[in-house]
Amino acid sequence: MALDHLALLIRLQDEFLAAVHDADPDAPVPACGAWTVRDLVEHLAGIHHWAAGNAYRVEPEPLGEGPYDLAAHFAAQASTLRRALSELDPDATAHVLSHPELLGPGPVRFWHRRQLHETLVHLHDLRAAAAGAGTPGLVDVGPEVWADSVDEVVTVFQPRQVGLGRMEPLRHPVALTATDAPGTPLWVLGAGGQRTHEVAPDVVVSGSAEGLALALWGRLTPEEAGLTVEGDRADLDAALAEPIVP
């Protein structure tokens, strides 16, 4: 059954907002450089605002410099996004992420999926600020949701990073398999946006869909994610060292 990306997005926005109320704004966020919780919340609020503008195909109004009341600021921008995505026809034309141009025409439903996974990863980040680095299992969604996040990296983000000149094509593609998500493909990272590759990769990485997604997003190491690596581990390390996501 297809995921209801918009319903999942709204649910995770609500969970993110609840977590903001309990978070220390000055706490560092693991795996996010020098970011604090304040930086993280302002980032996701800004991304929601920007995505709503792209869904409407308009230039978003500047949000200003802050400082913001974090909970109120996030709630306002989350509401703006969900209103846009709820009232627009999912098949209507929006501005979506593209390459070699940054943005191009595509369906509004692109933003249902993109903002779901943006919120999913950043909800993990927000909870990791309290739980500590290297902690899996911080967001209670099914493996099919995490598998969809893996699919987005493989088919959208990594090829887009190549198309925008932010990285070179991977010299050694990496096969990925989610052991807890039956029916998902054997993805091949570095297959040019295709899910498979005509030449079998020299390394196959298996584990939970969550572990795969958070490793691809640089939130967990393969060990923290509980991944099993068969073949040349150096190929996996080389891929993860590249900017495969923005």
Image: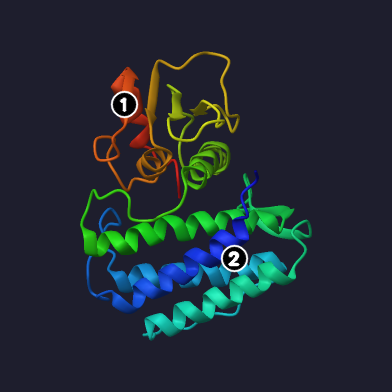
| 46 horizontally vs 228: left or right | right
> Do residues under tags 1 and 2 come within 8 Å of each other at their CB atoms?
no
| 81 horizontally vs 28: left or right | right
| 87 horizontally vs 100: left or right | right
In this rendering, the answer to whether 125 lies above or below 154 is below
| 71 horizontally vs 103: left or right | left
Q: Residue 224, position in %: x, y?
A: 25, 40
Camera-side residue of 140 and 117: 140
Q: Residue 8, position in %: x, y?
A: 55, 59
Q: Amino acid at mark 2?
A: Ala
Query: Which residue is disc 1 drawn over?
Result: 228
Q: Residues within 10 Å of mark 1 (few under 14, many from 20)?
A: some
The secondary element bearing badge 2 is classed as helix
Camera-near label (1 vs 2) is: 1
The secondary element bearing badge 1 is classed as strand
> Which residue is located at x 32 percent, y 23 percent?
229
Q: Residues within 10 Å of mark 2 (few under 14, many from 20)?
A: many
Residue 51 image label: 2
Question: In terms of image quadrants, where is residue 40?
Answer: bottom left
> Which residue is located at x 67 percent, y 72 percent?
84
